[in-house]
């Protein structure tokens, strides 16, 4: 019996890396056609003018709809100096920000980072983070993997007919798979 248990343990250990990397097949059809999204344009929604967290413009460059939810890429034109996101968590998405223009302050966990044009930062899923625009204007490319519901968050914020309260903002974050855990990041 001990030999059978040993063989089972060895077989299970050898198969474990394959089982950990196995991803359940997502239902849906992935876009198999290439496409171009021109400079200054947003795919599907056009410019998304945000309300609440900041007054920035967002252009969807690659929608989660294009990738069956695997990836989303946005270009953000930052028009709200001194404003940014509340400290929040994406439980299921990693984010990468690449600064094209301007300056930003990021907090990831307890660490703070100054970013300027050409800098990038990786924000791992489930780690609290926030950012604030330091310069008068700026632009960033934001990549999410998997796409999650951030595109829906942006369109919801843009569709509001009023400036949302902090409670409304927390609810909208929650409705789009994000959790607000603290206030916006202040520039010292």
Image (spheres, rainbow, N blue to C red):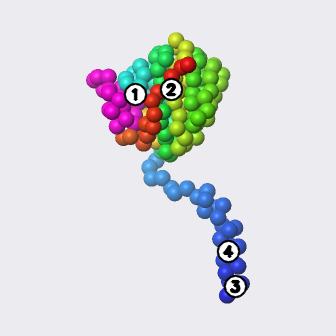
Task: Examine the rendered structure and indicate whether residue 116 appears above or below residue 123.
Answer: above
Judged by depth in the image, the label closer to the viewer, 4 or 1, is 4
Mark toward the start of the polypeptide (1 vs 3): 3
**Residue 34 or residue 180, whichever sits in front:** 180
- Which residue lies at the image location 37% right of the left edge and 24% below the top edge? 52
Tell me if residue 112 is in the magenta stretch.
no
Q: CA distance from mark 1 to mark 2?
A: 29 Å
- Asked if disc 2 and disc 4 are in contact, CB closer than 8 Å, the reply is no
The reply to whether residue 116 is in sight is: yes
Q: Start and end of the magenta stretch?
A: 153-173
Residue 2, picture quadrant: bottom right
Return the residue found at the far front.
Answer: 188
Label 4 packing within 10 angstroms: few (<14), some (14-19), many (20+): few
Look at the numbered disc 2 and give the secondary structure of its residue.
loop
Look at the numbered disc 3 and give the secondary structure of its residue.
helix
- Which residue lies at the image location 51% right of the left edge and 30% below the top edge? 130
Residue 15, picture quadrant: bottom right
- Asked if disc 1 and disc 2 are in contact, CB closer than 8 Å, the reply is no
Q: CA distance from mark 4 to mark 3?
A: 10 Å
- Asked if disc 1 and disc 3 are in contact, CB closer than 8 Å, the reply is no
Label 3 packing within 10 angstroms: few (<14), some (14-19), many (20+): few
Which residue, given by chain and number where applicable, does mark 2 sit on?
Answer: 185
**Relative horizontal placement of residue 22, taking residue 151 as reference (left or right):** right
- Which residue lies at the image location 67% right of the left edge and 87% below the top edge? 1
Q: Residue 9 has which mark?
A: 4
Return the residue found at the far top.
Answer: 136
Which residue, given by chain and number where applicable, does mark 3 sit on?
Answer: 2
Look at the numbered disc 1 and give the secondary structure of its residue.
loop
The reply to whether residue 31 is in sight is: no
């Amino acid at each position: 019996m001990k030999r059978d248990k040993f063989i089972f343990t060895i077989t299970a250990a050898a198969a474990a890396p394959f089982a950990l990397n196995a991803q359940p097949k997502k239902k849906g059809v992935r876009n198999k056609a290439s496409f171009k999204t021109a400079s200054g344009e947003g795919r599907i929604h056009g410019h998304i003018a945000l309300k609440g967290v900041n007054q920035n413009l967002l252009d969807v460059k690659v929608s989660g709809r294009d990738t069956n939810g695997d990836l989303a890429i946005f270009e953000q034109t930052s028009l709200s100096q001194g404003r940014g996101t509340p400290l929040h968590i994406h439980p299921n998405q990693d984010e990468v920000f690449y600064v094209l223009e301007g300056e930003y302050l990021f907090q990831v966990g307890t660490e703070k980072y100054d970013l300027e044009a050409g800098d990038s930062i990786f924000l791992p899923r489930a780690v609290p983070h926030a950012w604030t625009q330091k310069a008068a204007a700026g632009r960033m490319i934001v990549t999410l993997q998997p796409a999650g519901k951030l595109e829906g968050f942006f369109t919801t914020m843009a569709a509001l007919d009023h400036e949302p309260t902090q409670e409304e903002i927390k609810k909208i974050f929650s409705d789009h798979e994000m959790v607000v855990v603290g206030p916006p990041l202040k520039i010292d």
